[in-house]
Image (cartoon, rainbow, N blue to C red):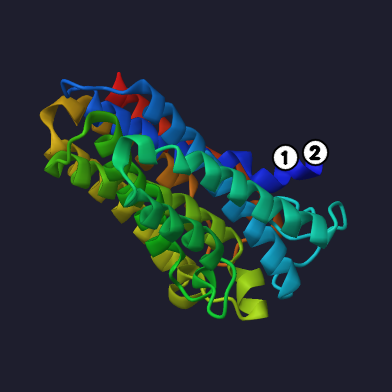
Amino acid sequence: MNAWIEAMRLRTLPVSTAGVVAAWALAAVSPVFRWVPAVVCLLFAVGAQIASNFANEYYDYRDGLDRRGRSGPRRGVTEGDIAPQAMKRATYGVLALTSALGLSLVAWGGLWLIAVGIVIAVGALAYSAGPWPLSRHCLGEVMVILFFGIVPVNFTCWLVSGTWSEAALLVSLAIGLMGANVLIINNYRDADDDRAVGKHTLATLLGRKVVRALYLVFAIVACLLAVTASSRFTSAASVYVVGAMSIWWRMRLPQNPSAASLAALNPLLGLTACSMLLFAILLFA
């Protein structure tokens, strides 16, 4: 059970939750707020992320991209705690259940939402699988901005309130950039391992020094976008600025960090994800 819980990567689940909660904040100021689709969107987002995390673990193992004793969280398949075929079945099982849950949203949004659901399902797999896995070609951050920011915030807001808005677009970009920072820490930590197996991320392409700076840039731009969206969000955005700055200082590592210092980034990854969720909760409050 511990191995499966670890495979879900609980530290990262606030990333999918934050986008939906931010959408609730935007919908809360509308005349209509539908709680049932709001909750379904939350469950759908979490399920899609768990399926994507399972797929990442299985396909990275299959393609020889993980090794035992890595700096990051323990990989159950690589370490022999979970059978590869069991992880593969779990990936597609969770994705199927999540897709079935998502179909219920057709009742509020119409049949055209099926196309959106298919794109999300394909994206969950294409991140790690397929002929050209996106996470291995420096497109991980782009995927996060799209599928953890733009898509969940805008579509959840529309399903819950029946409205689209410029504020939703700005907040969705802000949430997406915050989510990208979680991935930046992950890839910063794994840069040496990824480079050794030929996996291309922004950290291996640009180097740790550049992505440390990118982390700060994403945090500041995210806050500016949220403030621009509405003055009501100013205090929450300011809180995120403080949190992002403190995390930034904690990321000031030497250019050639030791294995111990890289392992210490695991709690920092969770802290970045939680600060993102805190930001969304403050918007809602």
In this rendering, the answer to whether 172 lies above or below 183 is above
Count of numbered marks: 2
Residue 85, quarter of the rendered image: bottom right
From the top left corner, tell me how far across and down residue 69 is, in percent: 80, 59
Residue underneath mark 2: 2
Q: Amino acid at mark 1?
A: Ile
Between residues 251 and 176, which one lies in front from this camera angle?
Answer: 176
In this rendering, the answer to whether 87 lies above or below 174 is below
Callout 1–callout 2 Cβ contact below 8 Å: yes
Q: Residue at x 35, y 60 (%)?
A: 214
Between residues 159 and 213, which one lies in front from this camera angle?
Answer: 159
Q: Amino acid at mark 2?
A: Asn
From the top left corner, tell me how far across and down residue 141 is, in percent: 41, 61
Q: Helix, strand or loop at disc 2?
A: helix
Structural distance between the alpha carbons of marks 1 and 2: 5 Å
How crowded is the residue under tag 1: few (<14 C-alpha within 10 Å), some, or many (20+)? Answer: few
Residue underneath mark 1: 5
How crowded is the residue under tag 2: few (<14 C-alpha within 10 Å), some, or many (20+)? Answer: few
Q: Residue at x 64, y 59 (%)?
A: 55
Q: Residue at x 26, y 22 (%)?
A: 33
Q: Helix, strand or loop at disc 1?
A: helix
In this rendering, the answer to whether 167 lies above or below 133 is above
In this rendering, the answer to whether 236 lies above or below 47 is above
Q: Quadrant of the N terminus?
A: top right
